[in-house]
Amino acid sequence: MLTNNKNVLSWVDEMVALCKPDKVVWIDGSEEQLNALRDEAVSTGEMERLNEEKLPGCLLHRTLQNDVARVESRTFICSRKEEDAGPTNNWCDPKEMYAKLTPMYDGVMKGRTMYVIPYSMGPIGSPLAKVGVELTDSIYVVLNMDIMTRMGKQAFENLGDTSNDFVRGLHSKADINPDNRYIVQFPEDNTIWSINSAYGGNVLLGKKCFALRIASYQGKNEGWMAEHMLILGIENPQGEVKYITAAFPSACGKTNLAMLIPPEVYKKQGYKVWTVGDDIAWMKPGKDGRLYAINPENGFFGVAPGTNAKSNFNALESTKKNTIFTNVAHNLDDNTVWWEGLDKNPPENAIDWLGKPWNGKTSTEKGAHPNSRFTAPAINCPCISPEFNNPNGVPVSAMVFGGRRAKTAPLVYQSFDWNHGVFVGSTMASETTAAATGAVGVVRRDPMAMLPFCGYNMGDYFAHWLEMGKILGDKAPKIFNVNWFRTDDEGHFIWPGFGDNMRVLMWILDRCDGKVDAVETPIGYEPKPEDINIEGLDITVDTIKDLLNVDIDLWKEEAKGIEEFYAKFGDKLPKELANQLEALKKRLGC
Ligand code: GTP
Ligand code: SPV
Ligand code: MN
């Protein structure tokens, strides 16, 4: 036992009595203990050790074929009132849900060990950090939580002996039966129950379940924000750093943008980019009235396919040691890993993500699952921000929304003001990706990239955003929207993307500093095409003009789509947003 906190101890006792594990092991976070767990996972075949020279400390894991992504249809927000979960979440009465799940957990850990994982989301000692305890029967979970959070004894130091402010997470892989899979948040109880999955997003309970679903609910009650946002800093040649947060839906480019390498034109002037976070931001007004952001995580759970030395050098570097790879291809020639888009040289002698022999040169099947992932320590990242562990976080100058839109959304535009920015975020839409089970490539509304992650009524969430704008006043970050994914008639991406996205971020920062003019359009302020720096690119100002084009007919359709979406919220939709929609329609001439 690593704590005298009675609330922790009595809850662990209760869960032990329910799950009936053969053994209970408290995770102190020591290398000794973790090494023993690694050895055990390797000896049972749960994980494989990779090439100790090329990938020191790295492990490979495959999940079951039916268990490779988040499952939104089996994810629930169990608030006491249905209205508090709102129209975008699956809801069930908490009593009913506990009654349904309790028998499933009864004796589920017989013959297994229960690991008790204390962890901190946010730097230890940060006023913005929060404590969680996850109980699990999976070594894979323990080893991932070690990378993704500040895990071990130190986390309890933040809690003290009497506090009850910790999130109670209970996970069992049970028999990984998809028909009995549940990922359940009880926001009013600070509790998460997850069963019958062993895939990251469903089982690393500190991440989406706590740091977004539970934390968004806490943030509303406590006056802060938990968002599906990356955090990056851009340092100018004078050494000043400005911070930007950005919310894109799953697998839409957060990790890539967070770690971008500046194009030559900026690099030669001395600009640098620093990564604070790649997926989640917790933000609170600071003493000076500005909004400050911390990354509650300690590592990256990143999409592997498409990651290569050119697209995301820093992410690839981050995976070179002490990393866990999930559902990638295993190159048997040198005991390393491979995924689609890593290089043009797939291994011939390999095992695919399904565990079957695979020849990358001749096979028409994929070697890695499209949602295969790496779990890499943040400290491995060559551009990790010196502020990464700053307990007070970093001040946010701009917030960016974006998604995958083949046509409608232009490369970039700025909202007229905070409330209009909330409107822009609340009406975001994007094509679905492999990060969740279900159809890929279907456009759906995904407000603030939080559709699968908001732990309460989305209408109340919009109201909270509007409220934060009032509190921040003229110190509020400026709000923008971007789209890297516009396609031409052949379906090719027009904008080069990746590192070149910095060209757009530079316009954004210039706007924040009042250094550059803009053009007013019905949807917001746009750059003059010549104000996007294209030095060194083989595209012309005319291409930028095309990328910035606002097609009024498409936007009239868009306004209809927004109206339908907003109708879901009934009287929970803030008046201000209904007014914003009317104003947009008027500007479009609807
Ligand atoms: P989650 O971890 O699921 O939240 O995803 P994410 O938002 O961090 O997405 P990530 O950066 O991992 O990118 C997902 C996919 O989008 C990868 O296949 C990338 O190669 C691709 N991608 C990222 N940025 C760009 C871009 O600027 N342009 C294009 N065309 N593709 C991009
Ligand atoms: C996402 O889907 O947005 C992720 C991966 O970041 S997961 O942890 O599975 O949610
Ligand atoms: Mn994510």
Image (cartoon, helix red, strand yellow):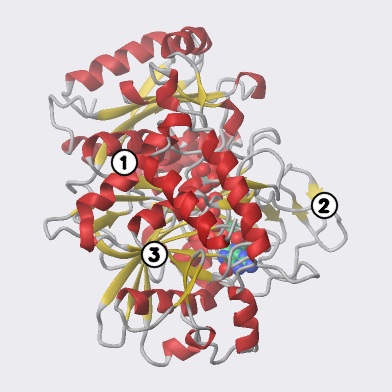
Cβ of mark 3 under 8 Å from ligand 1: the answer is no
| Residue 232 is at least partly visible in this image | yes
Indicate the secondary structure of the residue bearing disc 3: loop
Instruction: Determine whether, in the image, residue 416 is placed left or right of residue 46.
Output: left
Give the residue number, with chain letter if any, for mark 1.
29
Q: Is residue 132 above or below residue 341?
A: above
Q: Position of residue 236 (x, y in %)?
A: 31, 83
Q: CA distance from mark 3 to mark 2?
A: 47 Å
Judged by depth in the image, the label closer to the viewer, 2 or 1, is: 2
Indicate the secondary structure of the residue bearing disc 1: loop
Identify which residue is drawn at 51% across, 62% down: 587
Q: Looking at the picture, which amino acid does disc 2 mark?
A: Glu
Q: Looking at the picture, which amino acid does disc 1 mark?
A: Gly
Q: CA distance from mark 2 to mark 1?
A: 39 Å
Indicate the secondary structure of the residue bearing disc 2: loop
Q: Residues within 10 Å of mark 1 (few under 14, many from 20)?
A: many
Give the residue number, with chain letter if any, for mark 2.
365
Q: Is residue 150 above or below residue 12?
A: below
Q: Residues within 10 Å of mark 3 (few under 14, many from 20)?
A: some
Where residue 411 sits, quadrant-wise, is bottom right
Task: Return the disc, 3 or 2, that comes first in the chain's sequence.
Answer: 2
Identify which residue is drawn at 70% across, 68% down: 487
Give the residue number, with chain letter if any, for mark 3.
416
